[in-house]
Amino acid sequence: MATASRVLGWLAALGLAGGLAMGFGVAPRETTQGFVQRIMYLHVPTAWVAYLAFGVVFVASIVYLARRTDAADRVAHASAEVGVVFTGLTIAAGSIWGKPTWGTWWTWDARLTSVAVLFVMYLGYLLLRGMIEEPERGARYAAVLGIIAALDVPLVHFSVYWWRTLHQPPSVMKPGAPTMPPVILATLLVNVVAFTLLYLYFVTKRVELLRREQEARLA
Amino acid sequence: MSFARRAWAVTWKDVLVERRSKETLNALVFFALLLLFAFQFALGPDRDRLAQAMPGLLWLGFILSGLLGLGRTFVTERENDCWEALLLTPGDKSAVYVGKLAGNLLLMFTVEALLIALFAVFFNVDLSAALPALTLVVALGTVGLAAVGTLFAAMTANIRARELLFPILLLPVQVPVLLGTVKATEAVLAGEPLAAVAQWLKLLVAADLIYVVSGLLTFDFILEG
């Protein structure tokens, strides 16, 4: 377990270094947006990791309720924590990009709004976990909330999308151009893989920490 | 006892307790009236502005009353040490969920009917033409609100900071219901036919189904201990 985690850590570091080098060195400067476009190489991977993390919370929650294995609960807990951090990063990076590009830090665009709702939903999940003293009950309640929250994600997505688009067509965040230059696409993919490895590294570390905390409590 | 009988026992007990103590309903009606005052003061006397904001205000009123009312779902059980009695319910615990949900719907519908009447009087709007469509929208939204509210009330019942945690958990999950109902209410009050907001109604029906079914399936895990 420890070696696996170490290998993951080094792979993630390697991937991030490669992604960084490609993002700043290899990928060309975008003509219309300029230098700031490079934030995409951070923004898209963190957004992907956030959704991945909450998907893992959903699956781990179901596994916990069905099997009652502490390991599943620890995975859900760790994944939710990492997911919230990466959602925050996504919003922050998006804001930094939005200011020079759209001229505003924040707009109630469909995608921004649904990510923001996701953020507060899983912050609430972590709050619930923090407020229950008995570990077994906390795990059970959190699992129920993890399932409800995940089922809510598509509803949030559609409602927020209609809410904005019925009103006005998306003027700022149109779907990306279908043809992306291969260099940019490759840079993006390297970063997505690197951040996924980073996510896995964080989760294994956090799971291990949670396991030791539990052992210390029982000892 | 059949599922329906067990659910009914819970609802009837709550209705009886409420009829005798009138604790929640009286306070909620008074609270709704105060909300109306607050909205009036916040927006000023401009009739057009009030009419424009009305769908949002109406649902803000329902949600705020719901946060107070639904949060108290399990207060009698907790304060009178009857939580164990709920746990001892024979058979499937989802009957308790259905019973509590039915009680909550009764409470919410009563408060909502009153709030709508108060709005019509104090904001001087004629709602009679829109009433049938409005009733449908309100019913769909309330089922979604109460279905999650009842589940989360059970979840937070035994936590010290429950008054704080309950709205924090409920509000983000209710975003689709809030958006759907406000949009549909807006259209209905503007005299548009229900067909114009069909996709919102479909979303509300889908949300209600998802919430009620997941409540039924997961309530057992909440009431375990």
Image: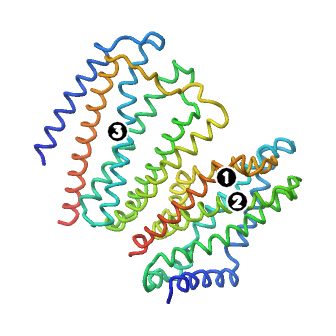
Identified by mark 1, the residue type is: Thr
- The picture places residue A21, in percent across and down from the top left corner, at 26, 18
Give me the residue at 24% from left, 37% from top: A197
What is the crowding at mark 3: few (fewer than 14 residues within 10 Å), some, or many (at least 20)?
Answer: many
In the depicted structure, whether residue A144 falls above or below residue B84:
above
* Residue at x 31%, y 65% (from the top left corner): A135
Q: Nearer the viewer, mark 3 or mark 2?
A: 2
Residue B63 screen position, x and y as percent: 65, 57
Crowdedness near tag 2: few (<14), some (14–19) or many (≥20) residues, C-alpha within 10 Å: many
Q: Which residue is mark 3?
A: A49
Q: Label 2: which residue?
A: B138
* Residues flagged by tags 3 and 2 on a common chain: no
Work out whether A1 lies above or below B34. above
Helix, strand or loop at label 1? It is: helix
Q: Are marks 1 and 2 in contact (CB under 8 Å)?
A: yes
Q: Position of residue B17 (x, y in %)?
A: 64, 83
Q: Callout 1: 10 Å neighbours few (<14), some, many (20+)? A: many
Q: CA distance from mark 1 to mark 2?
A: 7 Å
Name the residue carrying label 1.
Answer: B181
Mark 1 on the same chain as mark 2: yes
The one of A208 and A62 positioned closer to us in this rendering:
A62
Please, which chain is the residue tagged with disc 1 on? Answer: B
**Of the two numbered discs 1 and 3 in the rendering, the one whose residue sits closer to the viewer:** 1
Question: Which chain hosts label 3?
Answer: A
**What amino acid type should be assigned to the residue bearing mark 3?**
Val
Q: Disc 2: which chain?
A: B
Residue under disc 1 on the same chain as residue under disc 3 = no
Type of residue at label 2? Answer: Val
Q: Position of residue A8 (x, y in %)?
A: 17, 38
